Image (tube, helix red, strand yellow):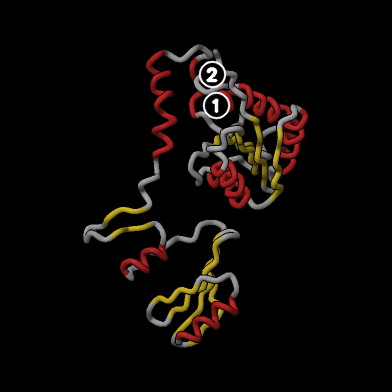
């Protein structure tokens, strides 16, 4: 007796920066006209909106009943894609033509479409989104001259999904020449070996001295909206994790 497979419910997470807001709104309206569920998280700077959409899409990858995809837009469509792709399992592709959207789905199994508010007119954007919606993985596309992929390419594409998902998983912690663990987390490095690897503040990060005297300082380091730490420097490194400056200072002074 054959079993009936319940189709996945399709849902989009959408967001844009101010340069992509209008094109995002057009595409959200189009998706809803197709009775596709959309969670519109609104407008923010490009790295924050890319991060927010990527985080949600990544966190819902293993839901058995929902196929969650992303729609992000900024001036070029590039910045939002970069930050959405920071999350595991997110394959955001910047698309400027309908052919780009077909290639992204056919070759890369892309689950987030990134569009340009400055280079793409509404009609083209809607056509791109329709192609993104209706193109299955491994289907004929402009890159295959609109013909079925040869068997060897089909085999490569079949294996690529599993191989891509492994990239980066084992890179966060490794051993250095002395046998100690190296970590991409600066706080972990401090706790492990009291050796600090300089960290470049990415776009969206802020480092500010909030109190200073000749022998010490308290520095606030904030990245995006979710990470904020206070560091007191007095020749060594003491770290107090807290969202409230007054609490952090009081705790640091209590131990002084």
Q: Secondary structure at mark 1?
A: helix
> Which quadrant would the C terminus be assigned to in this image?
bottom left
Question: Which quadrant is home to the N terminus?
Answer: top right
Q: Which residue is mark 1?
A: 105
**Helix or strand or loop: what does disc 2 sit on?**
loop
User: Which class describes the residues within 10 Å of circle 2: few (<14), some (14-19), or many (20+)?
Assistant: many
Q: In this orientation, which residue lies closer to the viewer: 124 or 173?
A: 173
Which residue is denoted by mark 2 in the rendering? 141
Per the model, the C-alpha gap separating discs 2 and 1 is 9 Å
Determine whether label 2 and label 1 are within 8 Å by CB: yes
Question: Dot 1: few (<14), some (14–19), or many (≥20) neighbours within 10 Å?
Answer: many
Asked if residue 97 is positioned above or below residue 142 in the image, the reply reads: below
Q: Residue at x 54, y 56 (%)?
A: 203
Left or right of residue 54, residue 181 in this image: left
Whichever of callouts 2 and 1 sits on the residue coming sooner in the sequence is 1
- Where is residue 38? Give x, y as percent: 71, 37
Does 93 sit left or right of 200 as displayed? Answer: right
């Amino acid at each position: 007796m054959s079993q009936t497979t319940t189709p996945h419910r399709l849902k989009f997470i959408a967001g844009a920066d101010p340069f992509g807001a209008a094109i995002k709104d057009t595409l959200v309206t189009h998706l809803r006209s197709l009775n596709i569920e959309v969670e519109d998280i609104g407008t923010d700077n490009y790295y924050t909106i890319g991060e927010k959409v990527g985080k949600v899409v990544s966190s819902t990858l293993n839901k058995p009943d929902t196929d969650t995809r992303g729609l992000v837009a900024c001036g070029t469509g590039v910045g939002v894609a970069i930050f959405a792709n920071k999350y595991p399992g997110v394959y955001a592709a910047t698309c400027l033509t309908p052919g780009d959207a077909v290639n992204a789905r056919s070759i890369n199994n892309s689950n987030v479409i990134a569009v340009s508010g400055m280079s793409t007119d509404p009609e083209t954007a809607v056509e791109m989104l329709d192609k993104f919606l209706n193109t299955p993985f491994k289907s004929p596309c402009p890159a295959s001259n609109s013909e079925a992929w040869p068997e060897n390419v089909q085999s490569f594409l079949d294996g690529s999904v599993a191989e891509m998902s492994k990239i980066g998983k084992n890179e966060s912690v490794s051993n250095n020449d002395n046998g100690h663990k190296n970590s991409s987390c600066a706080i972990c490095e401090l706790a492990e070996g009291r050796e600090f690897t300089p960290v470049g503040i990415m776009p969206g990060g802020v480092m500010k001295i909030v109190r200073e005297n000749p022998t010490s300082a308290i520095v606030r380091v904030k990245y995006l909206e979710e990470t904020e730490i206070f560091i007191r420097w007095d020749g060594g490194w003491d770290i107090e994790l807290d969202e409230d400056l007054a609490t952090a200072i009081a705790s640091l002074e209590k131990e002084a």
